[in-house]
Amino acid sequence: MVKPERKVVKYTETPTSESALKYDKKAGKRAVDSSSLKPSSAIVPAKKQRGESFGKGVGKWNVNRRSKSIEPASSRIPTMGGEIEEVGDLSTFDFEFSFKGYGKHISDISEKCSEFLRCVQGHLRQYDPSLDFADKPVYTLFAEELVRAVSHVNFMVTRLEKTELRIVKLTSEVEALKEKLDRQVEISKEMTGEAESARGRLKEAGNRLGMLRDQLEREKNERDTEILLLKEENEKLKAAGSDIVLRTVQTMIGKALGEMRIRYEGHLDHLHQCLVDAEEVNRLNSLINQVKYSLELYAGLRTDGIEIPKEKIEKLQADLKSLNEEFDSLDVEVAKPEDYLV
């Protein structure tokens, strides 16, 4: 809807009847006699002079812009000419105008330019083809310039609206990317915490394994010391020279050595096997945790729209299945607290 500035004027002097009816062939315009001028008559401007602008003089009328009709304010109907006195200011007014160019610009169709210019200038009647001035160069140039100006404003408004919509869209995309980045940071923190926890458990298991090795070394040294003491005692008994005592001592030593061998060698072998089994269990458990961590990480990335090769996920799942089967097939020996007692 176009709303240009307008002024409402009235005529205070009445020209003579001789000047009321004229026809100017050069200008191609007509003046209207006051006796034939009615509220529904068209008021046509005279020829434009240098320094003047296109327009029309209107008597003191009550103007209905919506219905495009004129009602006289008094019984006297003014005529063209005389001094102009401002009686009001309608800075904006509405008019209805429809144009379908079917691929053409309005400036390429002189009739539509003329009709549009009549609306902008404030003509209150519907378009009358008999009053067409579109073939006049000055009038046509003015109409084209006016149409181009209005079209340029409309184009700029459209581009501004598109730019604002694009800004809003880009802002929403930036917010979405920020939220996605925050989620990735949280997931990374959680994964880092889990990795730290797994490293802590692995370190604890290594410390416990070291303690078990130290304990086994101490027990082995104690057994070696006992064996040396028994051997020394056996040598002392041999030195006594008594066959009975010697046989008795040898029997006792042999019995003791046999009991120790049966009792402690199997015990040590059991503890050694427990250590070997514990190392194997820790190794498989660490591999399983690493595969699970990778699968969880890829699942989170796929949820966020990041493509992960299907072959990589299938390989990890196959590795996890193989490790679980290997873990389930283990036949391990578990050391009990009493196994460490002598």
Image (cartoon, helix red, strand yellow):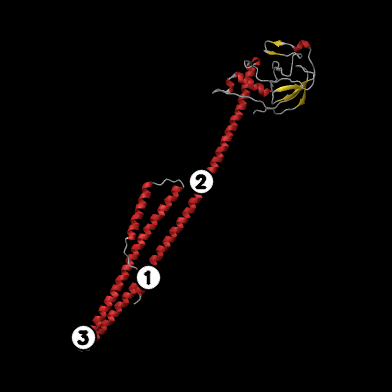
- Give amino acid for label 2: Leu
Residue 211's disc number: 1
Quarter of the image with the C terminus in it: bottom left
- At horizontal 28% and vertical 73% (from top left) the residue drawn is 266
Apparent side of residue 199 relative to residue 14 in the rendered image (left or right): left
In the rendered image, which residue does mark 2 sit on? 177
* Res 169 quadrant in image: top right
In three-dimensional space, the C-alpha distance between marks 2 and 3, rounded to whole angstroms, equals 91 Å
Residue bearing mark 3: 247
- SS class of the residue under badge 3? helix
Q: Gap between marks 1 and 3, in whole Å? A: 42 Å
Tell me if label 1 and label 2 are in contact, CB under 8 Å.
no
Q: Position of residue 110 (x, y in %)?
A: 60, 18
Of pointers 1 and 2, the one earlier in the residue sequence: 2
Mark 1 vs mark 3, foreground winner is: 3
* Residue at 56%, 37% in the rendered image: 165
| Location of residue 136 in the rendering, given as x and y in whole percent from the top left corner | 63, 15
Q: Earlier in the sequence, mark 1 or mark 3?
A: 1
Which SS class for mark 1?
A: helix
Along the viewing direction, whichever of 49 and 307 lies nearer the viewer: 307
Q: Is residue 142 above or below residue 21?
A: below
Q: Residues within 10 Å of mark 1 (few under 14, many from 20)?
A: few
Label 3 crowd (10 A; few <14 / some 14-19 / many >=20): few
Is residue 241 in view?
no
- Judging depth in this view, the residue of 59 and 231 nearest the camera is 59
Marks 1 and 2, how far apart at CA? 51 Å
The secondary element bearing badge 2 is classed as helix
The image quadrant of residue 149 is top right
Q: Which amino acid does label 3 sit on?
A: Arg
Residue 4 image position (x, y, % from top left)? 68, 27
